[in-house]
Image: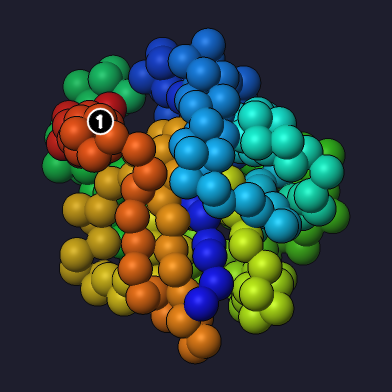
């Protein structure tokens, strides 16, 4: 058996302001900082000590990981960053207020953009400042892989090769691995681990700042999974994410 910890980054300032974020590199809110520290406290209470860590190239995830590892005295473990763990790219929605977008486009369309499996939001133009190729982190990307907008299916397609090529080899050595990423990149991974269908994945909600711990067998399929901490608090946090999805926020 080997242990995998999945952690959605703490609340960001744009989460707080109800704005589509995607690949926009925003900071954690004060609440998000607390969530990163509390995630470390939960891991310490469960005596789960990661040996290696993975995160995206977005600072809300990187900062959450830093806070969590510091809390358990593991800032020294190797940390690997990859754009393949980034949040879903929300295209032309990035930077827009979610409630105003809902008023403009209607609940059904916004819900499809946000929560459906294969419907991406409107794409960005290549010369838009929000396009990845206009960010120095991603200028190396061939144009055909730099997303102008993504569906969840697109996130799975670009993330799973990284799972197999980078993360799985560490798990096979028996190391405890932590992945700190984003709502949709983690939904993609949970879909794989729990064998969730395309039809059922839109209803999956992952709360911020609460470690989700998997025990994986020799074939790296899930034997058990659980959120750490008070289960009523976990249920409330998950319900809050679900309510936001229903409201298009």
Relative to residue 13, is residue 15 drawn left or right?
left
Residue 165 percent location from the top left of the image:
69, 77
Which residue has dot 1 on it? 233
Q: Residue at x 15, y 42 (%)?
A: 108
Residue 6 percent location from the top left of the image:
49, 52
Q: Residue at x 53, y 62 (%)?
A: 4
Against 75, is 2 above or below? below
User: Is 99 or 237 nearer to us in this picture?
Assistant: 237
Relative to residue 117, is residue 54 drawn left or right?
right
User: Is 76 or 25 nearer to us in this picture?
Assistant: 76
Quick one: SS at disc 1? helix
User: Is 241 or 39 nearer to us in this picture?
Assistant: 39
Q: The C terminus lies in which quarter of the figure?
A: top left
Against 16, is 82 above or below? below
Q: Residue at x 39, y 74 (%)?
A: 222
State the image quarter where residue 23 is shown. Answer: top right
Against 205, is 246 above or below? above
User: Is 66 or 89 nearer to us in this picture?
Assistant: 66
Q: Is residue 93 among what the camera can see?
A: no
Residue 105 percent location from the top left of the image:
23, 32
């Amino acid at each position: 058996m080997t242990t995998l910890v999945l952690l959605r980054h703490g609340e960001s300032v744009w989460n707080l302001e109800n704005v589509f974020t995607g690949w926009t590199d925003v900071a954690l809110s004060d609440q998000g900082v607390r969530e990163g520290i509390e995630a470390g406290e939960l891991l310490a209470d469960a005596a789960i000590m990661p040996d290696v860590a993975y995160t995206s190239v977005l600072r809300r995830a990187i900062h959450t990981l830093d806070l969590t590892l510091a809390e358990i005295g593991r800032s020294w473990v190797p940390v690997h960053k990859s754009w393949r763990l980034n949040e879903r790219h929300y295209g032309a929605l990035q930077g827009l207020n979610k409630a105003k977008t809902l008023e403009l486009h209607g609940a059904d369309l916004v819900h499809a953009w946000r929560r459906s499996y294969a419907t991406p939001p409107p794409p960005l133009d290549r010369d838009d400042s929000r396009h990845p190729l206009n960010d120095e982190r991603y200028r190396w990307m061939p144009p055909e892989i730099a997303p102008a907008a993504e569906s969840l299916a697109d996130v799975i397609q670009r993330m799973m090769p990284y799972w197999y090529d980078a993360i799985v080899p560490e798990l096979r050595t028996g190391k405890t691995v932590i992945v700190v990423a984003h709502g949709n990149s983690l939904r993609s991974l949970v879909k794989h681990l729990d064998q969730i269908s395309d039809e059922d994945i839109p209803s999956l909600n992952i709360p911020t700042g609460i470690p989700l711990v998997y025990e994986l067998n020799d074939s790296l399929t899930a034997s058990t999974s659980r959120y750490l901490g008070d289960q009523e608090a976990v249920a409330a946090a998950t319900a809050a994410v679900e309510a936001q999805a229903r409201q298009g926020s």
